[in-house]
Amino acid sequence: MAVVKVIEIIAESTESWEAAVQDAVTEAAKTVDGLQTAYVQDFQAILEGNKIVKYRVNVKVSFIVK
């Protein structure tokens, strides 16, 4: 049996939702070893003048605690 911890990260990108998720994972990996999963809970598009200018995601990242 393993103990798994989940942290929640809000990230954004001007490129895409996928890039925003990757940014969240990259940022989490700076301080956490052994990331296991990234669960995208919410998607949000920030608009200016009827155009998407930012893609925002709420990501739950899990890792095993030793």
Image (cartoon, helix red, strand yellow):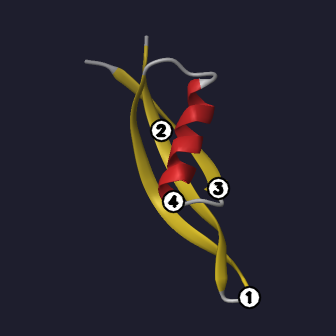
Whether residues under marks 4 and 1 lie with C-beta atoms below 8 angstroms apart, the answer is no
Q: Is residue 10 above or below residue 51?
A: above
First of labels 3, 4 by sequence position: 3
Disc 2 residue type (three-letter): Val
Which corner quadrant of the image does residue 30 belong to? top right
Q: Which residue is mark 2?
A: 61
Q: Which residue is mark 3?
A: 12
Distance from Cα at disc 1 to Cα at disc 3? 19 Å
Q: Dot 2: within a 10 Å radius of its alpha carbon, few (fewer than 14), some, or many (20 or more) residues? A: many
SS for dot 4? helix
Distance from Cα at disc 1 to Cα at disc 2? 33 Å
Distance from Cα at disc 2 to Cα at disc 4? 16 Å
Nearer mark to the viewer, of 1 and 2: 1
Q: Position of residue 54 (x, y in %)?
A: 66, 66
Nearer mark to the viewer, of 1 and 3: 1
Disc 3 residue type (three-letter): Glu
Q: Position of residue 60 (x, y in %)?
A: 48, 45
Quadrant the C terminus occupies: top left
Distance from Cα at disc 3 to Cα at disc 4? 8 Å
Nearer mark to the viewer, of 2 and 4: 4
Q: Which residue is mark 4?
A: 17
First of labels 2, 4 by sequence position: 4
First of labels 3, 2 by sequence position: 3
Distance from Cα at disc 3 to Cα at disc 2? 15 Å
Which corner quadrant of the image does residue 13 belong to? bottom right
Distance from Cα at disc 4 to Cα at disc 1? 20 Å
Q: Position of residue 9 (x, y in %)?
A: 60, 45
Q: Extreme right residue here? A: 48
